[in-house]
């Protein structure tokens, strides 16, 4: 089992990586998105050098609002292209997994078409990712794709995709955690952890919100999962991130 953190995309990733290494995290969940961490902005050499120097592992994470289900071909192709541009970089950084986020699409387009367009986009990205030795993982997100049945259809259409379980997202609006874990435990490859008040994606420290972490960690352990966990806790005072790790490790070890 490994514990990592995600870089804040408002800050140059190089300084973030220093903090993660200083506090002995195992990996950086490297998100390449605007305003300060998009692939077109960062100093790629400096980031790669820093990762090598700190010997942190890397998991790739991409922009969460890309229009993979746009009915307009050129828009969808641009979204796909934006992810494909990052793949070589992620592979060079030592990543094996890259997260993508399904797109809820646009109003007049029906759900089946939206699911199909997401699947089509992820198939193209996944084929390209494999050339770099990378596996694409799909994250459950609030809204249409918090529904396990909608995600299941994407996985049915593109079986080589892995599942990235975001525990915080699984509790927003209603509790879908056990349903998601039950359906996709065999393709589960990465987990995000953050707390919330069950209504919005608050990204609170573990134990500060309403999620029952004892139950969550016990259920995850029961599946035999022993992979990577990212603490997606976005508190200004970083001591809450470190406290979240303490809480997680305590629960994991009992
Ligand atoms: Zn997440």
Image (tube, helix red, strand yellow):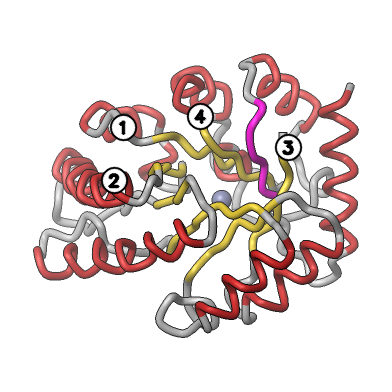
For residue 253, which quarter of the picture? top right
Q: CA–CA distance between discs 4 and 3?
A: 20 Å
- Mark 4 or mark 1, which is nearer the start of the sequence? 1
- Mark 3 or mark 4, which is nearer the start of the sequence? 4
- Mark 2 or mark 1, which is nearer the start of the sequence? 2
User: For residue 227: magenta?
Assistant: yes
Label 3 crowding class (10 Å Cα cut-off): few <14, some 14-19, many 20+?
A: many
Q: Main secondary structure of the magenta part?
A: strand
Label 2 crowding class (10 Å Cα cut-off): few <14, some 14-19, many 20+?
A: many
- Residue sitting at 60 percent across and 38 percent down? 171
Per the image, the residue denoted by label 4 is 188
- Foreground tag (4 vs 3): 4
Per the image, the residue denoted by label 2 is 126
- Residue sitting at 27 percent across and 62 percent down? 67
Disc 3, SS: loop
Task: Provide the residue span drawn in magenta.
Answer: 226-230
The answer to the question of whether label 1 and label 2 lie on touching residues, with beta carbons closer than 8 A, is yes
Q: CA–CA distance between discs 3 and 1?
A: 31 Å
Pick whichever, 202 or 12, lies toward us.
Answer: 12
In this rendering, does residue 196 appear at all?
no
Location of the N terminus by quadrant is top right
Per the image, the residue denoted by label 3 is 211
């Amino acid at each position: 089992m490994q514990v990592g953190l995600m870089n804040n995309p408002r800050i140059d990733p190089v300084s973030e990586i220093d903090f993660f290494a200083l506090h002995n995290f195992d990996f950086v969940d490297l998100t390449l998105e605007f305003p300060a961490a998009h692939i077109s902005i960062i100093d790629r050499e400096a980031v790669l050098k820093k990762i090598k120097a700190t010997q942190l592992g890397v998991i790739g994470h991409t922009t969460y609002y890309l229009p993979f289900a746009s009915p307009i071909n050129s828009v969808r192709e641009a979204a796909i292209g934006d992810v494909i541009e990052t793949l070589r970089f992620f592979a060079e950084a030592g990543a094996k997994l890259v997260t993508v986020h399904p797109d809820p699409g646009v109003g007049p387009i029906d759900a089946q078409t939206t699911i199909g367009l997401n699947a089509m986009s992820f198939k193209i990205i996944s084929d390209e990712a494999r050339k770099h030795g990378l596996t694409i993982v799909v994250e459950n997100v609030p809204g249409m794709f918090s529904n396990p049945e909608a995600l299941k259809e994407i996985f049915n259409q593109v079986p080589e995709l892995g599942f990235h379980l975001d525990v915080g997202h699984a509790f927003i609006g209603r509790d879908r955690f056990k349903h998601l874990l039950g359906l996709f435990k065999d393709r589960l490859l990465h987990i995000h952890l953050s707390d919330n008040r069950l209504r919005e994606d608050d990204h609170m420290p573990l134990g500060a919100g309403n999620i029952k972490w004892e139950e969550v960690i016990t259920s995850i352990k029961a599946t035999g999962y022993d992979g990577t966990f990212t603490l997606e806790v976005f508190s200004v005072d970083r001591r809450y991130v470190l406290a979240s790790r303490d809480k997680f490790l305590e629960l994991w070890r009992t």
